[in-house]
Amino acid sequence: MANDLIDHMLAAMPLPAVMVDQSELIIAANADALTLLGPNLVGRNFVTILRQPQMIDTIEQGLKDRASCKTRFLSSEGGQDTTYDVHTRYVPAVGSGSGGALLVSFNDRTQLEQAGQMRRDFVANVSHELRTPLTALIGFIETLRSAARDDEAARDRFLGIMGDEASRMNRLVGDLMSLNRVESQERVRPEEQVDLTALIGSLLNTLGPLAEGAGVVLQPLVPETPIVVPGDADQLKQVFSNLIENAVKYGGSGGRVRVELSKSDRDPAMRGPAARVRVIDEGPGIDPIHLPRLTERFYRADSHRSRELGGTGLGLAIVKHIVNRHRGRLKVESELGQGAAFTVSLPM
Ligand code: ADP
């Protein structure tokens, strides 16, 4: 096969690929291979480029046995580890002396690996979150059956704790189901027209008793006129309810939570008209090191406080997915001791 033709064929492949001949020289490489492995590959011995032992063994074996082989190649791009499935196929009548050559192609499976890792982490997290209340329940059932059997006061106290633990599990399962529903709808654009002015007004009424119980004043700054966005009313209610509940729960010590609704004809982040809802508290705030990860499932800035207050660690993950579904933006601004501001922008 003429070298030009080999080059054209490699260039047409949608994967990084190189060709290695019987004298172990790289005789062709496409542009994706140069990006992956570095420039000036052609004419060099493959061992000087692909130094990983399993790569060397696989290519040597492929050349010797003229067989198809498979192995893994590990690399790192932009500070991130990447994993490739490498396939070799023997191509006869190519290369010097027509001894044939080996086509070596690289298939990036990093995203698959990451998805697998995320799934494993998720299952481990859910099991861990469920185990704590379950262990408590099993322990108390045991105690009620034995030592506390005839102790009415202890029985009442234990039943109270058991009720709290069961509610915690119930909230967790509820949030997991919400997250699942929201994720499965993420690509379906909502079509209702939602009046945010009315929605936030009714939400503030609903959450009034919760705030009052925590000694927090809810201060709305909401226009009189309707601000309407395309959206899913139930999901948007969940977004603002999660944010306001968090502000009361974590930022309540500041004594007040501001809830502001406004609209802009040209929001810089949305590149067009947008509605903006801000939930601002004056509590202890969040250390900025936590901000980039705050919307990850089960991520907690203050783990002890979240658990003490019955948090599931899923509230902001649900918020992020709903905002994504609405093609909106969530911005979190906070500093320790300075309160926190959560801003949701929604295209109109
Ligand atoms: P949780 O169920 O733990 O409340 P969320 O996903 O709603 O989970 O929030 C994640 C974490 O972000 C919380 O555990 C808490 O540490 C932190 N957080 C959220 N809102 C605030 C806030 N207004 N002030 C301080 N910390 C907050």
Image (cartoon, helix red, strand yellow):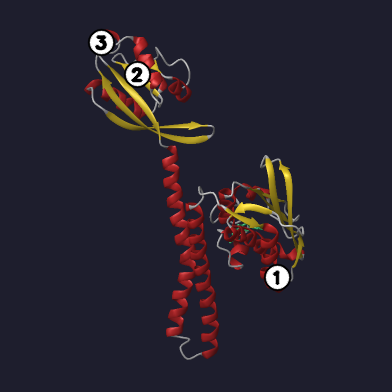
Q: Which disc is residue 131 wearing?
A: none
Nearer to us of marks 1 and 2 is 1
Can you tell which quarter of the image residue 45 is in?
top left
Q: Is residue 256 above or below residue 33?
A: below
The answer to the question of whether label 1 and label 2 lie on touching residues, with beta carbons closer than 8 A, is no
Q: Which disc is residue 98 wearing?
A: 3
Q: Which disc is residue 19 wearing?
A: 2
Q: Is residue 161 above or below residue 82?
A: below
Q: Could you tell which of marks 1 and 2 lies nearer the N-terminus?
A: 2
Residue 26 showing in the rendered view: no
Instruction: Count all numbered tags in the image, as a single digit.
Output: 3
Q: Residue at x 60, y 61 (%)?
A: 238
Q: Could you tell which of marks 1 and 3 lies nearer the N-terminus?
A: 3
Is the shortest distance between ligand 1 and the CB of mark 1 under 8 Å? no
Is the shortest distance between ligand 1 and the CB of mark 3 under 8 Å? no
The kind of residue tagged 2 is Met
User: CA–CA distance between discs 1 and 3?
Assistant: 83 Å
Quadrant containing ligand 1 reads bottom right
The answer to the question of whether label 3 and label 2 lie on touching residues, with beta carbons closer than 8 A, is no
User: CA–CA distance between discs 3 and 2?
Assistant: 13 Å
Q: Could you tell which of marks 3 and 2 lies nearer the N-terminus?
A: 2
The kind of residue tagged 3 is Ser
Pointer 3 local density, CA inside 10 Å: few below 14, some 14–19, many at least 20: few
Residue 119: x, y in percent?
A: 43, 51
Quadrant location of the N terminus in the rendered image: top left
Can you tell which quarter of the image residue 251 is in?
bottom right
Residue topped by disc 1? 208
